[in-house]
């Protein structure tokens, strides 16, 4: 199973930023750089999975 997690990082006084991580069978296999929005992070993460695994993730989980 391939899961794409979208993480929101918040620091007081700073705009939140969003990172994606790819988990393959319960182990993290990739982590992104920060993105300015949830939508951009999700799109970039899905594109990464498609390029590297040849398919869409089984699940996308915002955390």
Image (cartoon, rainbow, N blue to C red):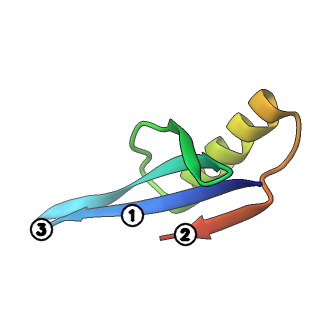
> Do the CB atoms of the residues marked 2 and 3 lie less than 8 Å apart?
no
2 vs 3, front mark = 2
Residue 52 image offset from top left, x and y in percent: 75, 28
Q: CA distance from mark 1 to mark 2?
A: 8 Å
Q: Residues within 10 Å of mark 2 (few under 14, many from 20)?
A: some
Query: Which one is earlier in the sequence, the residue at label 2 or at label 3?
Result: 3
Which label lies toward us, 3 or 1? 1
Quadrant of image for the N terminus: bottom right
Mark before the other along the chain sequence, 1 or 2:
1
Residue 54 location (% of width, % of height): 88, 34
1, 34: nearer the viewer: 1
| Residue matched to label 3 | 12
* Location of mark 1 (residue): 8
User: Disc 1 vs disc 2: Cβ atoms closer than 8 Å?
Assistant: yes
In the rendered structure, find residue 37 and report the number of the disc placed on it: none
Q: Position of residue 61 (x, y in %)?
A: 61, 68
Q: Is label 3 in contact with label 1 (beta carbons under 8 Å)? A: no
Please tell me the numbered disc located at residue 62.
2
User: What is the secondary structure assignment of the residue under circle 3?
Assistant: loop
> Eyeballing the image, is 47 above or below 7?
above
Task: Identify the residue shown where x is 81% and y is 34%.
Answer: 53
Residue 12 quadrant? bottom left
When the figure is inspected, residue 60 is found, relative to residue 54, above or below; the finding is below
- Relative horizontal placement of residue 45, taking residue 15 as reference (left or right): right
Q: Residues within 10 Å of mark 3 (few under 14, many from 20)?
A: few
| Left or right for 52, reference 36 | right
Percent x, y of residue 63:
47, 71
Tell me which residue sits at (80%, 59%) in the image.
58
């Amino acid at each position: 199973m391939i899961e794409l997690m979208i993480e929101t990082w918040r620091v007081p006084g700073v705009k939140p930023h969003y990172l994606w991580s790819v988990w393959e069978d319960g182990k993290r296999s990739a982590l992104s750089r920060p993105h300015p929005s949830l939508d951009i992070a999700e799109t970039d993460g899905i594109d990464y999975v498609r390029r590297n695994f040849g398919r869409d993730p089984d699940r996308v989980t915002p955390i």
